[in-house]
Every structure is written in structure tokens, then in C-alpha cells.
Image: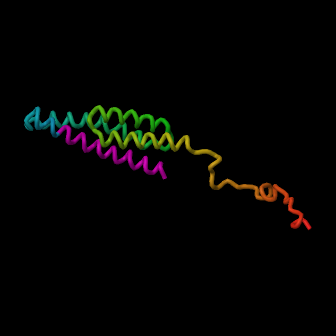
Amino acid sequence: MSSIIGKIAIWIGIVAQIYFSVVFVRMISINIAGGSDYETIFLLGLILALFTVLPTIFTAIYMESYSVIGGALFIVYAIIALCLYNFLSSILWLIGGILLIWNKYSKDESTDENEKVDIESTENQFESKDKITKE
């Protein structure tokens, strides 16, 4: 259950990062260029999106087979997003990374619900010392 929550948090963080990239580029276009040079602003936005979103998407796609590495990478992405003042993606990626690592190491064989128990060996381990029931 917590792995599903982690995956959902990671994908919501990716969508928030895409939105943040669009808003960031739009704010730069208004402040710096005055909104006149759209080709340069488009290239800046494309480069920003490529460097911030594509690594997270590739990590999210391959996190099934490499959950510990993916969890560690998403914690690093969370720190980078925090430095870019993208707090929503940072929090979501931090939660998702911790849950990915937690799920990998919390799977213990002793908590397996489908484990078969030998009932013969567990029942009647202690003999009754009551004389009434023995007679």
C-alpha cells in the first residue's frame, strides 16, 4: 500500500515540476525579455524542462527494478527542487523516495501472511497436569 502512495507522490511531483518549469519560464519572459523574444524564451524553457523533468521521468519509469537507487535519486531530486524553490515537488519526491527505500527493506520473511504453519507441531505442546482431565 505504501509503495502505491510513494509512486503516486512521485508522479504528482513530476507534474508539479512541469508546471513549475512553465511558470518559471513565463516569469522570466515577462521580467527579462519583456515578452518580445519568444524564440529564446522557448529554448530556455525547453532546456529547463529537459534538465529538470526528464531525469525524474526516467527514474520513475525504472523504479520498479531499482527501488533503492530510485529512492535515493528521488531524495537527491528533492534537494535540487528545494534549491529551485519548488517546495511541492520537493516534499512529494522526498516522501516518495523514503517510501521506495522503506518498502525494499521492510519486506521480512517473518511477516509473510501466506506462510504455511505446521499445525501438528504447534498444538498440544504442553501436556495437561490436571488429574481430572487425565482420568
Q: In front here: 68 or 49?
A: 68
Question: Residue at position x 32%, y 39% from top?
Answer: 53
Q: Quadrant of residue 90?
A: top left
> Which residue sits at x=27%, y=43%?
18
Q: Position of residue 26 (x, y in %)?
A: 16, 40
The residue positioned 10% from the left and 33% from the top of the image is: 33
Q: Is residue 2 left or right of residue 47?
A: right
The quarter of the rendered structure image containing the C terminus is: bottom right
x and y percent of residue 99 in the render? 46, 43
Q: Which residues are magenta?
A: 1-25
Q: Position of residue 110 (x, y in %)?
A: 65, 47
Q: Nearer the viewer, residue 102 or 23?
A: 102
Horizontal side of residue 110 vs 58, given as left or right: right
Q: Residue furthest front?
A: 131
Residue 83 in the image, given as x and y percentages of width and height: 29, 31
The magenta stretch spans residue 11: yes
Q: Quadrant of residue 131?
A: bottom right
The quadrant in which residue 25 appears is top left
Instruction: Name the residue located 81 percent from the left edge and 55 percent from the top edge.
Output: 125
Q: How many dots with numbers?
A: 0
